[in-house]
Amino acid sequence: MEDLRSKGLGLVGISYDSQEILADFTKRHGITYPLLSDTGSATIKRYGILNTVLEEALGPNGKDPAVRADLAIYATVNEPSERQRGIPFPGTFMLDRQGRVTSRFFEDYYWERNTVSNMLLRLGTGGAPVQATQASTAHLDLKAYPSDANVALGTKFSLAVDITPKRGLHVYAPGASNYRVVSLNVTPQPHVRTTAVRYPASEIYFFKPLNERVPVFQKPFTLVMDVVPEATVEARKALTGRNELVITGTLEYQACDDRICYNPATIPLSWTVALQPLVPGAPARQ
């Protein structure tokens, strides 16, 4: 909360639970920000984020195999219960001081959540909130770090690499032909899902000797990839007892200056985050 306030941000949680339930939850888990009670899911419905898959599973088509398959994804349960009627699709809205939505982040799997650090990093207002690994080559300097030091199953966090090309050098951006485009690659592992790398805007470099224009990065830039340790029943069984998640990968690139194109290079990378319970003290759900 202090970090958010220092950025001029506030935080509010909204759920369909009663004020009494929210008060008890706040006390038991030490919540220090407001939780708002949307009894009857009026606000949830008004924002168009009612979990309609769960509603259908509780209706006459509840036994349909397609509905059951969606239920496992969008509610992360095998059997729907009336207690769950009215829940939203999980997500976060960011508002300006006039109450206008400026950004929104939503998930598919009900147990998956973006972290605040992840969202700020994706908006370009985050930094390196945890310990980073630094490396340097003849062509560039880099800093690799996760958005969060601690995650739970279902936490959507980010792997980031800050890259600063050396003076007079550039690396190639997506769209460049006949060159090795800079890329962040992660070693696959069971029950850990990754998304495509997000690239910032590049600039066009004119290579006069070949009369060639190519997209490049010459100034400091950041590559970001989202990672989710899955919260499915299978993943919870497989990852139970693990107290950390180690992710390995590589940064690949080719650097050039105004005279020479150097050989493609590969830098090994590694990120380690602590694994914590989904909700401390909560029983496992099936």
Image: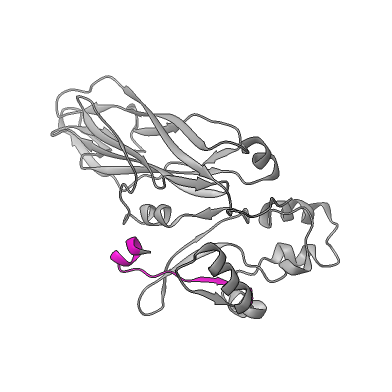
Residue drawn at x 23%, y 21% is 262
Q: Is residue 115 visible?
A: yes
Expressed as whole percent of the image width and height from the top left, the position of residue 206 reads 19, 37
Residue drawn at x 33%, y 47% is 200
Vertical arrangement, residue 245 with respect to residue 83, above or below: above
Work out whether residue 21 or residue 41 is closer to the camera in this orientation and state it: 21
Quadrant assignment for the N terminus: bottom left
Residue positioned most to the top: 263
Residue drawn at x 62%, y 46% is 231
Residue drawn at x 68%, y 71% is 86
Position of 139 with respect to 104 (left or right) is left
Q: Which residues are magenta?
A: 2-18
Vertical arrangement, residue 37 with respect to residue 179, above or below: below
Expressed as whole percent of the image width and height from the top left, the position of residue 96 reads 36, 73
Number of residue marks: 0
| 7 magenta-colored | yes
User: Residue 171 falls in which quadrant of the image?
Assistant: top left
Vertical arrangement, residue 230 with respect to residue 10, above or below: above
Expressed as whole percent of the image width and height from the top left, the position of residue 233 reads 70, 44
Work out whether residue 41 or residue 6 is closer to the camera in this orientation and state it: 6
Q: Is residue 195 visible?
A: no
Position of 144 with respect to 197 (left or right) is left
User: Residue 224 falls in which quadrant of the image?
Assistant: top left
